[in-house]
């Protein structure tokens, strides 16, 4: 399935997450709202997405699991 989502910068700056996270993270928020799985190392963004019941993984959790498996 091919998925294209286009938002103008002005549209993103009008959204709630923009004031807290900026334009790049607001873009990730919008993608997650549209069913795209988010991957981030930014805990505040991860927490915000989780609290909005959006699909996201904190990449640090994957890295730490991999490290612990090697011990």
Image: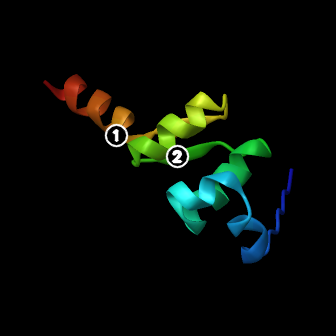
Q: Residue at x 52, y 46 (%)?
A: 39
Q: Which mark is residue 23?
A: none
Q: Residue at x 82, y 68 (%)?
A: 6
The residue lying furthest to the left in this view is 71
Measured in 3D between alpha carbons, the distance from the residue under mark 2 to the one under mark 1, in whole angstroms, is 10 Å
Q: Which residue is mark 2?
A: 39
Q: Quadrant of residue 35?
A: top right
63 relative to 31 in the view: left or right: left
Q: Residue at x 59, y 67 (%)?
A: 23
* Mark positioned earlier in the residue sequence (2 or 1): 2
71 relative to 19 in the view: left or right: left
Q: Which mark is residue 60?
A: 1
51 relative to 30 in the view: left or right: left
Circle 1 packing at 10 Å, graded few (<14), some (14-19), many (20+), is: some
- Residue 35 position (above or below residue 4): above
Element on which disc 2 rests: strand
Circle 2 packing at 10 Å, graded few (<14), some (14-19), many (20+), is: some
Residue 32 in the image: state x and y as whole percent: 69, 45
Residue 29 in the image: state x and y as whole percent: 65, 50
């Amino acid at each position: 399935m091919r998925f294209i989502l286009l938002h103008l910068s002005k549209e993103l700056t009008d959204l709630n997450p923009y004031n807290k996270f900026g334009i790049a993270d607001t873009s990730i928020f919008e993608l997650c709202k549209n069913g795209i799985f988010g991957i981030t190392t930014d805990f505040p963004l991860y927490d915000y997405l989780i609290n909005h019941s959006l699909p996201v993984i904190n990449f640090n959790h994957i890295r730490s699991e991999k490290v612990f498996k090697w011990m």
